[in-house]
């Protein structure tokens, strides 16, 4: 999946390079925090980063060579983005994938030098953000058991691979050097990568399960699962005194507010401003439908009369302004509906288990923190 | 470390190309690829000239053609993608050997193939004439964040160790009669990957402690400060500058 030189034009490659550089810079700071936590590691975040992230990058590099036989003669290998994010955390994950891609580009000529930004953005940033987001989201909803971790890892890896393929298609749609109909690219890319994603998901889940069975403390995504240490004193179980200055505090204990605000801002910006520059031509599916006459039988959508029909606000005549406004309203509605669903599910999960209120309450509290 | 300290990617030599400081070479390769990518695809002869330029550098570095071509096999997967293009891109069709190919598709395939191949050849030349450690120092000289360079150097140093560990695990599995034949055996392979992660991570912790006990504070001291003279920069710039001339010619003659 390494993008070679000359496939994406220079402006888009440069823009992707800026995105990748920003992500790597943020990850350098975040990885220091992620790797600086743990029983042996207080205050050593900065100097632990290089050896640990380097060794994890070497691991990713090696595990990409581990061939998994699929059927008679064919085999696949792991891409590792989701695995890295779940095992060592999203920041370190992005950092390791970026370093692996950089070294592959310079040393093995795998992936073009001018396409390095595209490669890091698609395979590092998108994969890690999508997989880690899904992973955390599922862990919040599912019961707090080890099996949930492997199930979430499966789903996260499953979605992350086609998501990266879709991100590549998006970049190709903006800056591809050849006009392949985007619908076709998307179908081919996502179709193939759903298959790859199934393998990736199975192996990621198996690997995470294997690590969790031996060293659950090493799985970054499952840190909240560690049971509190109990001591048996005079035949009775009592809680062990908490070690000073809680090294067990999960790394991501910072408020997610900044992240949420940034994400919302980006979505609004994309919907409101960038969509001005999107192609006004029908997209691949609409075009195929129009060409083949499929759409003759399509009845007007029930909401066609709604104020947002065809992505424009009804009474605003400026096409760009109305498209942008519709995009922003759409983002707002999606956010409201999405967080509503999450809130309801979260409420139900915490109220469903009143009997075990102790662990469940603390669980939801730590989930809130995370 | 009994088998020599140079990586197998590097081809030892004493040519003028080997002697150039790494950051000059890195900058030259990057500029060269940038120029190649911004050349119009219709200027077919320009890509031929680029190939001649690269062949000249390879001859100067005394890198044999067979070595170069073998290393360039890495681009085979995307050649397959390029071959598909003439069949899926819509547009004017031409008949060739009884096949109906689209003209824009052929141009697209040519574009990706030519630029991609030149990029791969340039990177292969860079990696085979520059030692890995020198490349990393060059990246640092080019103002890549020192932390990133450190991570990359740890990855390069331990990459072979970890890969060997993977191979030893595979030998151990096979000597116990295991053979991975299909999806049923993924469980074992997944456990191997998990064990490999734990070993890598624990090795990282040990490396960190060992370095701490030798006075490591988070930064690597730079012992050999590399400098490049004006003459070295000039000779490194010969490749991208001549490529730039070809590119400009390509745009004007179009």
Image: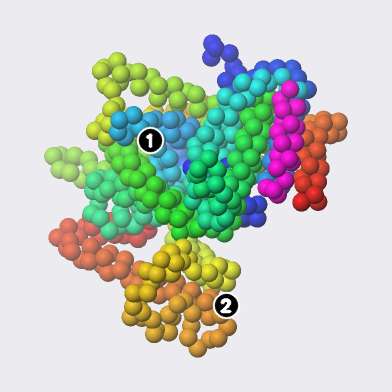
Residue A137: x and y, percent?
34, 57
Residue A314: x and y, percent?
48, 86
- A288 is higher (above) or lower (below) than A89: below
Q: Can residue A74 be spotted in the picture?
A: yes
Residue, x 50% and y 24% (percent of image)?
B160
- A264 is higher (above) or lower (below) than B151: below
Q: Real-space Cα distance between discs 1 and 2?
A: 45 Å
Question: Residue B52 colored magenta?
Answer: yes
Q: Which colour assignment does the render follow?
A: rainbow
Disc 1 target residue: A76
In the rendered structure, the answer to whether residue B27 lies left or right of residue A4 reads right
Kindly indicate whether the residue at mark 2 contacts the one at mark 1 (C-beta within 8 angstroms).
Answer: no
Residue bounds of the magenta highlight: B40-59
Question: Residue B33 colored magenta?
Answer: no
Residue, x 33% and y 80% (percent of image)?
A302
| Quarter-of-image position of residue A75 | top left
Q: Chain of mark 2?
A: A
Q: Residue furthest top?
A: B2
Q: Secondary structure at mark 2?
A: helix
Q: Chain of mark 1?
A: A
Tag count in the figure? 2
Residue, x 37% and y 69% (percent of image)?
A294
Q: Can residue B28 be spotted in the picture?
A: no
Residue, x 31% and y 59% (percent of image)?
A365
Residue A109: x and y, percent?
59, 34
In this view, the residue in front, B1 or B24, is: B24
Residue B210: x and y, percent?
51, 26
Magenta span dominant secondary structure: helix
Circle 2 residues within 10 Å: few <14, some 14–19, many ≥20:
some
Disc 2 target residue: A320
């Amino acid at each position: 999946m390494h993008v070679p030189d000359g496939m994406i034009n220079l402006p888009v490659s440069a823009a992707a390079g800026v995105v990748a550089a920003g992500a790597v810079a943020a990850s350098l700071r975040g990885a220091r925090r992620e790797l600086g936590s743990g029983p042996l590691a207080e205050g050593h975040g900065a100097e632990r980063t290089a050896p640990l992230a380097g060794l994890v990058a070497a691991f990713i590099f090696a595990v990409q060579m581990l061939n998994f036989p699929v059927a008679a003669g064919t085999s696949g290998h792991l891409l590792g983005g989701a695995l890295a994010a779940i095992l060592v955390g999203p920041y370190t994950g992005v950092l390791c994938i970026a370093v692996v891609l950089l070294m592959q580009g310079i040393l093995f000529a795998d992936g073009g030098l001018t396409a390095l930004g595209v490669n890091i953005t698609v395979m590092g940033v998108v994969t890690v953000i999508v997989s880690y987001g899904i992973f955390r989201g599922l862990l919040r909803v599912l019961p707090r058991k080890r099996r949930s971790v492997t199930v979430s890892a499966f789903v996260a890896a499953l979605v992350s691979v086609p998501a990266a393929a879709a991100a590549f298609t998006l970049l190709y749609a903006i800056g591809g050097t050849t006009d392949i109909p985007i619908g076709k690219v998307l179908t081919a890319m996502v179709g193939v990568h759903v298959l790859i994603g199934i393998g990736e998901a199975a192996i990621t889940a198996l690997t995470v399960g294997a690590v969790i069975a031996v060293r659950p403390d090493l799985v970054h995504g499952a840190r909240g699962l560690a049971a509190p240490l109990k001591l048996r004193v005079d035949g009775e179980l009592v809680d062990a005194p908490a070690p000073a200055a809680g090294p067990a505090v999960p790394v991501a204990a910072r408020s997610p507010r900044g992240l949420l605000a940034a994400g919302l801002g980006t979505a609004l910006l994309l919907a409101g401003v960038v969509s001005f520059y999107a192609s006004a031509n029908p997209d691949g599916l609409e075009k195929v439908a129009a060409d083949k006459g499929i759409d003759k039988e399509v009845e007007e959508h029930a909401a066609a009369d709604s104020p947002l029909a065809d992505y424009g606000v009804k009474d605003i005549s400026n096409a760009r302004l109305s498209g942008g406004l519709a995009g922003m309203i759409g983002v707002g509605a999606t956010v409201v509906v999405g967080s509503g669903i999450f809130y309801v599910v979260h409420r139900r999960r915490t109220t469903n288990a009143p009997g075990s209120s102790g662990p469940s309450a603390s669980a939801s509290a730590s989930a809130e923190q995370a | 470390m009994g088998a020599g300290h140079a990586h197998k990617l590097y081809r030892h030599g004493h040519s003028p190309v080997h002697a150039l400081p790494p950051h000059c070479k890195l900058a030259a390769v990057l500029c060269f690829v940038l120029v190649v990518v911004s050349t119009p695809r219709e200027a077919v002869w320009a890509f031929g000239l680029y190939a001649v330029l690269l062949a000249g550098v390879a001859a100067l570095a005394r890198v044999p053609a067979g070595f170069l071509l073998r290393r360039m096999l890495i681009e085979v997967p995307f050649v397959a993608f390029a071959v598909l293009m003439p069949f899926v891109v819509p547009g004017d069709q031409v008949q060739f050997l009884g096949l109906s190919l689209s003209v824009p598709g052929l141009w697209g395939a040519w574009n990706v193939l030519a630029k991609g191949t030149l990029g791969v050849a340039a990177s292969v030349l860079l990696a085979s004439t520059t030692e890995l450690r020198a490349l990393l120092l060059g990246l640092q000289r080019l103002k890549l964040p020192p932390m990133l360079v450190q991570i990359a150097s740890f990855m390069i140093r331990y990459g072979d160790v970890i890969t060997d560990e993977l191979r030893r695990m595979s030998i151990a599995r096979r000597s116990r009669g295991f053979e991975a034949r299909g999806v049923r055996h993924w469980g074992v392979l997944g456990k191997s990957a998990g064990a490999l992660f734990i070993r890598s991570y624990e090795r990282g912790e040990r490396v960190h402690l060992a370095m701490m006990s030798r006075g490591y504070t988070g930064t690597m001291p730079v012992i050999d400060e590399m400098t490049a003279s004006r003459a070295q920069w000039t000779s490194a710039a010969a490749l991208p500058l001549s490529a730039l001339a070809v590119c400009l010619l390509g745009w004007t003659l179009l």
